[in-house]
Image: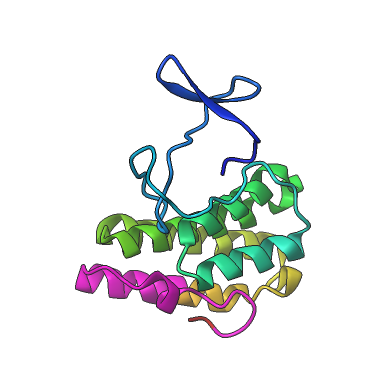
Amino acid sequence: MTGTSETRRAGGRDRDAEGRARNARPRDGLGRPLPYGEAGVERAPEGVVRRPERTVAEAQALLDAGRPFHAHEVFEDAWKSGPEDERGLWRGLAQLAVGLTHAARGNATGGARLLRRGAGAVEEWTAATGRPRPYDLDLAEVIRWARKLAAVVEGGGERVDAARESPRLRGGAG
């Protein structure tokens, strides 16, 4: 659900046990909020500290399942909890997942923009660090995938199938 065992509505806002704002509304597979009481898909817990290899594996499984919004949350955890010198990598990967989310929702402009922004961030991080394959990630291929999909999305303007179009993070892109 949200990474805490309890979420309550206080004054019309969802709060976790510590009183922090949390959105407890159920979500669909692309992260869109559903009405309270409807069945949604299980959300990735927030604030989980994972080893980088586990981050990549969990994100890939979510991407393969057509759940890029949820993969973005996994990358976001790595971005927020990982070493400072890797934050640009994880932020860029999170942007790519959000770009795929928007493309799958039918938002061609936002999808293409975020895919390109994420590709640029990953490319910049790779150039700055000289690490093209951290944790066995094939960053050159991921960048190529993102730019190719951005062009397709922008040119067609139609929703894409998130599972079919998801990248291969470790080896040839989707």
- Magenta span includes 166: yes
Foreground pick, 134 / 2: 2
Q: Position of residue 58 (x, y in %)?
A: 65, 64
Left or right of 160, for residue 95 = right
Q: Which residues are magenta?
A: 146-172
| Colour scheme of the rendered structure | rainbow
Q: Quadrant of the N terminus?
A: top right
Foreground pick, 161 / 136: 161
Residue at 63% in and 59% down? 125
Residue at 56% in and 78% down? 168
Q: Residue furthest top?
A: 11
Residue at 39% in and 77% down? 148
- Magenta span includes 149: yes
Residue at 61% in and 31% down? 6
Q: Position of residue 99 (x, y in %)?
A: 40, 59
Left or right of 169, for residue 27 = left
The correct choice, above or below, for 33 with respect to 150 in the image is above
Q: Position of residue 164 (x, y in %)?
A: 41, 79
Q: Position of residue 68 (x, y in %)?
A: 47, 61
Q: How many marks?
A: 0
Foreground pick, 117 / 16: 16
